[in-house]
Amino acid sequence: MHSKLVVLGGGPGGYAAAFLAADEGLEVTLVEAESRLGGTCLLRGCIPSKALLHVARVVSEVRELRRDWGIEFGAAQIDLGMLRARKEKVIANLSGGLKQLAKRRNVRVIQARGVFENSTTLRLDGDHESIPAERQLTFEQCVIATGSLPAMPANFQIGSPRVMDSTGALALEDIPGSLLVVGGGYIGLEMGSVYASLGTKVSVVELTDTLLPGADRDLVAPLQRHLKHLFEERIFLGTKVGSLGERNGVIEVAFEGPNKFGTERYDRVLVAVGRRPNSRDLGLEHTQVQLDSRGFIRCDKQQRTTDPHLLAIGDVAGEPMLAHKASHEAKVAVETVQGHASSFDKAAIPAVVFTDPEIAWAGLTQDQAARDGRTVEVAVYPWLASGRAHAIGRTEGFTKWLIDPTTHRVLGCGIVGAGAGELIAEAVLAIEMGCEIQDITESVHPHPTLSETLMNAGELYLGHAVEFYKPKKA
Ligand code: FAD
Ligand code: NAD
């Protein structure tokens, strides 16, 4: 079997590449090991976690109604089977949609594990009927989109189902009495919030001295205050877990300090200490592809690897390991295959942590500016001055712009607060378009919305914010 273009992996990088290439009239074969399209993001990542976080948010809003507004709905009754079924239905609907879209576009989908025999041949492992009898697929070009896998340090691999990775946590087998989350990053805080809102006593242990080490400290502070309350003070920063062991149906965890010592017992442990690129066992040693020291496939801005027949996109092609970065790289890869002078050169790839409050940032961060010795002006608008934030009882957030003091161009944006993930899109557009801060302040924003805070922060910078007094800029 031969195909002009093969895409290996059917996640948000791979299916986007296959569909876009088919739309351009290319003959495409998509090879995916699993029975459903969607990859990590749809089957065990972004979508199921956001479905559960939706439930967590509603539960916490109901609690706020009771505490702040005098409205009582009674204690939550959780039907775990129904909760799981609803999450599975969301996944099934979306992956069924992808199957239909592949069919309508004439993308040939083979359910097999692809392994490179050389730079233009994949061996197809598996027993699905879509695999051709010769078990080989040759191609002119192949886009590698095999994604990433949870990292599980060797000392945590004790063979107990009570020690879970993100996939295990999303399976929601039960609502454990207690859960230790190892790793205070995206997954740890999102899934920790889900379990805490369902009634589990959650603790978090993080190796560095801060939650979400990749985000600016000021953005993390309001979230950390909220999580301290949600996790009842059980956040152990700068702390190492020495060993795990199972005894009598609980996990014993030895903490090695410096901020917590001794042994504690937990019903379950979620290990969320990062992900590793899925580049092993692909037969890449039979090609000219080179990996970096962390196992990411080396590629240029056109998504070309060091092998002229192979391109790479998504998590396997480098950080940030985010679905929207994977699907944008898919667009670039397809344009490269067609011979266009396209390149992945983005000023702003948004990052969103879907906790409560949410944290979102795009473009330059204050940490990055400090590391680069770059002078920036920072305009911060506290949501305490926002009518909408007061109306919904969420005044803990703020919106900040990083601005070039000479050109007044917006270089970066950070938002913490309810719905920050939706609000950041305006900042992405502004940064990519090279807007000056006046472009934001001269655009009329709807009132009363939290989107106004992007305009208000700019007005504060220019010295004409209505709800704030700050001396005018010369
Ligand atoms: P993947 O989605 O990992 O897809 C790779 C596919 O390749 C898989 O389907 C796999 O079966 C297939 N494959 C691998 N090897 C082979 C082979 N040899 N042969 C055939 N097929 C193969 N990102 C966000 O942007 N927003 C979020 O909110 C978000 N939430 C997340 C929550 C969790 C719990 C997790 C784990 C991740 C989350 N992510 C989120 C990250 C996001 O899921 C990834 O960045 C994204 O899925 C990467 O897409 P990809 O196409 O590169 O790879
Ligand atoms: P992460 O890199 O976000 O966080 C891992 C955390 O674990 C870090 O803070 C790190 O310092 C800490 N850590 C590492 N080793 C440790 C140890 N031995 N003990 C204690 N702490 C340790 O990784 P993640 O949370 O596993 O998520 C993986 C990736 O998936 C993310 O980087 C992101 O790219 C993607 N993701 C994105 C979203 C989103 O966009 N909302 C959600 C989930 C996952």
Image (cartoon, grey):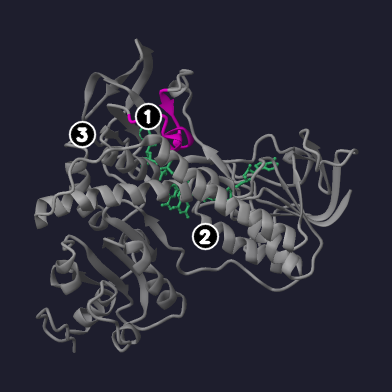
Residue 74 location (% of width, % of height): 17, 43
* Residue 273 in view, yes or no: no
User: Residues under labels 3 and 2: Cα distance?
Assistant: 33 Å
Q: Is residue 165 magenta?
A: yes
The quadrant in which residue 40 appears is: top right
Q: Disc number at residue 284?
A: none
Picture residue at 18% right of the left edge, 64% below the top = 392
Picture residue at 58% right of the left edge, 66% below the top = 344
Which residue is disc 3 drawn over? 234
Helix, strand or loop at mark 2: helix
Question: Counting residues from the N terminus, which is met first, the one under dot 3 or under dot 2?
Answer: 3
Helix, strand or loop at mark 3: loop
Is 303 situated left or right of 372 in this image?
right
Beta carbon of the mark 3 residue lies under 8 A of ligand 2: no
Beta carbon of the mark 2 residue lies under 8 A of ligand 1: yes
Question: Counting residues from the N terminus, which is met first, the one under dot 2 or under dot 1?
Answer: 1
Q: Is residue 5 above or below residue 135?
A: below
Beta carbon of the mark 1 residue lies under 8 A of ligand 1: no
Crowding around mark 1 (Cα neighbors within 10 Å: few <14, some 14 to 19, many 20+) is few
Depth-wise, is mark 1 or mark 3 nearer the camera?
Answer: 1
Q: Magenta region: which residues?
A: 162-175
Q: Residue furthest top?
A: 248
Which residue is disc 2 drawn over? 324
Helix, strand or loop at mark 1: loop
Which residue is disc 1 drawn over? 174
Asked if the residue under mark 2 is in contact with the one under mark 3, i.e. CB atoms within 8 Å, the reply is no
Asked if the residue under mark 1 is in contact with the one under mark 2, i.e. CB atoms within 8 Å, the reply is no
Amino acid on which disc 1 is placed: Asp
Amino acid on which disc 2 is placed: His
Is 435 situated left or right of 455 in this image?
right
Q: Is residue 396 above or below residue 118?
A: below
Residue 60 location (% of width, % of height): 23, 49
